[in-house]
Amino acid sequence: MPYSSSLTDREWVLIEPLLPKKKKTCPTKWSKRQILDGILYQLKNGCNWSDLPKDLPPYSTVFWHYKQWREQGVIENIRDVLHSQVRQQVKKKPNGQL
């Protein structure tokens, strides 16, 4: 896990099913996880898309997927699902303990 914004395996298991299924076309060079790591890196650090580290997918690929997923409501859905899961975890704890 090279960056603090990179997904852990546990986080990836939660998020992967929320991403759109890829249409059957030619294989891609970059995985959805690598692309999402690029998106999260940019969102966390606030850098220009073109300033993404070179070990992440090209910024044009990362930005294109970000735009597509944002327009399709994927980013918002991920936020809502994760928020709901955290709320349920808090409800399960006795006396509101964190």
Image (cartoon, helix red, strand yellow):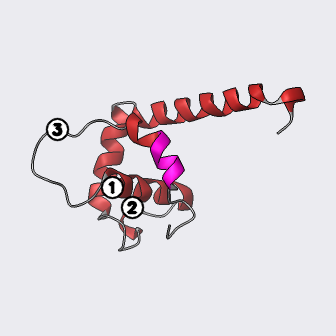
Question: Of the residues shown, which amino acid type is indicated by label 3?
Answer: Lys
Front tag of 1 and 2: 1
Quote the CA–CA distance across marks 3 and 1.
18 Å
Establish if 86 lies above or below 43.
Answer: above
State left or right for residue 34 relative to residue 64. right
Disc 1, SS: helix
State left or right for residue 57 relative to residue 13. left
Quote the CA–CA distance across marks 2 and 3.
26 Å
Question: Of the residues shown, which amino acid type is indicated by label 2?
Answer: Trp
Question: Of the residues shown, which amino acid type is indicated by label 1?
Answer: Val
| Residue beneath disc 2 | 49
Q: Residues within 10 Å of mark 2 (few under 14, many from 20)?
A: some
| Residue beneath disc 3 | 23
Which range is magenta?
9-14
Taking depth in this image into account, of 15 and 77 the one nearest to the observer is 15
Does residue 92 belong to the magenta stretch? Answer: no
| Residue 14 picture location, percent across and down | 49, 40
Front tag of 2 and 3: 3
Q: Are marks 1 and 2 in contact (CB under 8 Å)?
A: yes
N-term mark: 2 or 3 = 3
Q: Tell me the chief SS of the magenta region.
A: helix
N-term mark: 1 or 2 = 2
| Residue beneath disc 1 | 62
